[in-house]
Amino acid sequence: MEKSVFFKLCQKLCNMGALKRYLALYCRGTNRHGIIKKNRDISFHFTRSGETVSRYFNHVLYAIGQLGPEMLRHRSLDIPSKILGNPRFDPYFKDCIGAIYGRHIPCNVPSRIVDRFRGRKPLPTQNVLAVVDFDLMFTYVSAGWQRSAHDSTVLRHYLEHPNGLRVPEGKYYLADAGYATRRGFLPPFRQTRYHLREWRGNRARTPNELFNLRHSSL
């Protein structure tokens, strides 16, 4: 981020009342060498305690979150351009607005609960639920679930949560075989070839295989 943009962002947050005064932030991310700046590095740089750095960092995150109503826009429910007019997908998937996927991402958790986040991988991982549209934009993300949580369990929780995932009426998301068939979510046929690598040099022989091929391609 350029300095001029950073100061404009600070001014906007102050004008909104989200921040009481300017805060100097040392980006808690990666620098140009790809090195992650940790809390203790920031503490040393600004001669402040780790608690102070963490507290103000969370203040700023909360303030940026308040920009949501102004910066975020509802996605279009028109037929996606990837589908519209494409004989492989249109009209069969015309009401599809994206795909949902569960992924295990490495994480750092307190030692007292680390066993909940361990699985086949040596590092603890969290189960992250993500929804992506056909412009490859994230429209919903949920993180923090333990490794053992099943994808369907995570999805059900956020469908029932008051501020959770909502599927527009008459629309649906593509899902992999880890999810059950339910209103608003369309997984492939089970016990049928699905992944694209399984189709190399082969043609679909049944209607179910053809559906799975189109589903996987989309």
Image (cartoon, rainbow, N blue to C red):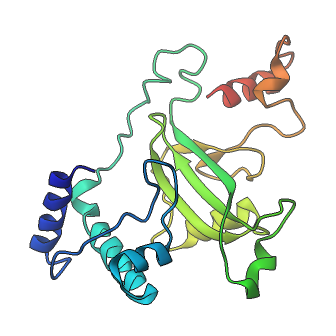
Q: Where does residue 95 sit, x and y in percent of width and height?
A: 51, 35
The quadrant of the image that shows the C terminus is: top right
Residue positioned 74% across, 24% down in the render:
213
- Judge whether 210 appears above or below 203 on screen: below
- The residue shown at (46%, 21%) is 84
Q: Residue at x 87, y 60 (%)?
A: 120
Which x, y percent locates residue 34? 51, 50
Quarter of the view holding residue 17: bottom left
Number of labels in the image equals 0
- Residue 17 in sight: yes
- In the image: residue 26, left or right of residue 161: left
Q: Residue at x 54, y 22 (%)?
A: 91
Q: Is residue 168 above or below residue 84?
A: below
Closer to the camera in the image, 207 or 117:
117
Point out residue 194 in the picture as x, y percentages from the top left corner.
80, 31
- Evaluate whether residue 162 shows in this view: no
Residue 122 versus residue 206: which sits nearer the camera?
122
In percent of width and height, residue 210 lies at: 76, 21
**Viewer-closest of 170 and 7:** 7
Q: Is residue 199 left or right of residue 6?
A: right
Q: Quadrant of residue 93?
A: top right
Question: Vertically, is 25 above or below 44?
Answer: above
